[in-house]
Image (tube, rainbow, N blue to C red):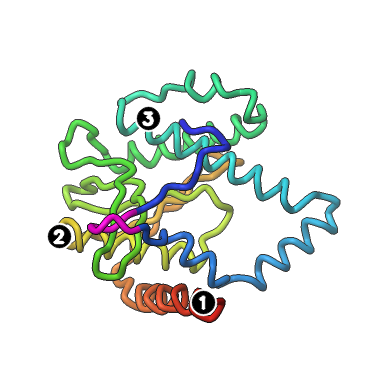
Amino acid sequence: MGKKTKVHTRYKNAEGKVVPSVTTIIDNIGWNKHILMNWVKKTTLAGEDPDKVRDKAADIGTIAHAIIEERITSEAPHLETIYAERDEYSSADLIKAEIAFEAYLDWEKKMNLDYTDERVRSEVRMVSEWYQYGGTADLLAPLGDVFSLIDFKSSNGVYREMVIQLSAYEWMVEENMNVAVPAHLLQVGKDEPDFHHYQFSDLSPAFDAFKAARQLHDLKKLIKT
């Protein structure tokens, strides 16, 4: 698992040129800026530092993703990898990440996931040559024998950015693998080991929004220039 100081993943197209990531494109637009501002106000009034709360949530998500990835790739969670970096993560964050992992295990059991299936792939890095952006899919695996895309979230809610992000991943999978995939979002709890599983039958409106955001990303740079 990477350190907190790990640089962001860089994606390059077939010509070796760096392209923006899905998250960068969406974050630069500020879809839910009003929600973020309300959250900052609420957090501040509660006597907490918004930056520290945000970083804490990011740490929990990082740890949870790392444990889940090792579960998928090694068929066993290597918790010693996480605890070896205890100096970088608080005990409270580790506990919440393990709760999220327990929720994942419950979902995994319900879905009857078989990691020996050669179609299972974790942390799949891809680039869309068509729209010139990159991203990493959390999991590609058969669900009910249907090859599917699954994105993990450890947030307290499901927001439209997540659905837009998922639509961008769905396009990349279909473009790179030439196969249609159902898109799923798995939200795992950090306070209680529960999960919420969402499947999306039509993400075309979300992808239309992403394509607009992709264009705005380039226009924004041109205007600055």
**For the magenta stretch, what is the residue range?**
12-17
- Secondary structure mostly seen in magenta is loop
Three-letter amino acid code of the residue under disc 2: Val
Q: How far apart are marks 1 and 2 (CA)?
A: 33 Å
Q: Which of 40 and 4 is in front in this view?
A: 4
Residue appearing at x 33%, y 36% in the figure: 109
**Total label count?**
3
Read off the residue under disc 1: 220
Read off the residue under disc 3: 70
Q: Does the magenta stretch include residue 114?
A: no
Q: Position of residue 118 (x, y in %)?
A: 15, 37
Instruction: Report which quarter residue 31 is drawn in.
Output: bottom right
Read off the residue under disc 2: 179
Instruction: Report which quarter residue 168 is drawn in.
Output: bottom left
**Is residue 45 rendered to the left or right of residue 140?**
right
Residue appearing at x 46%, y 62% in the figure: 162
Q: How far apart are marks 2 and 3 (CA)?
A: 26 Å
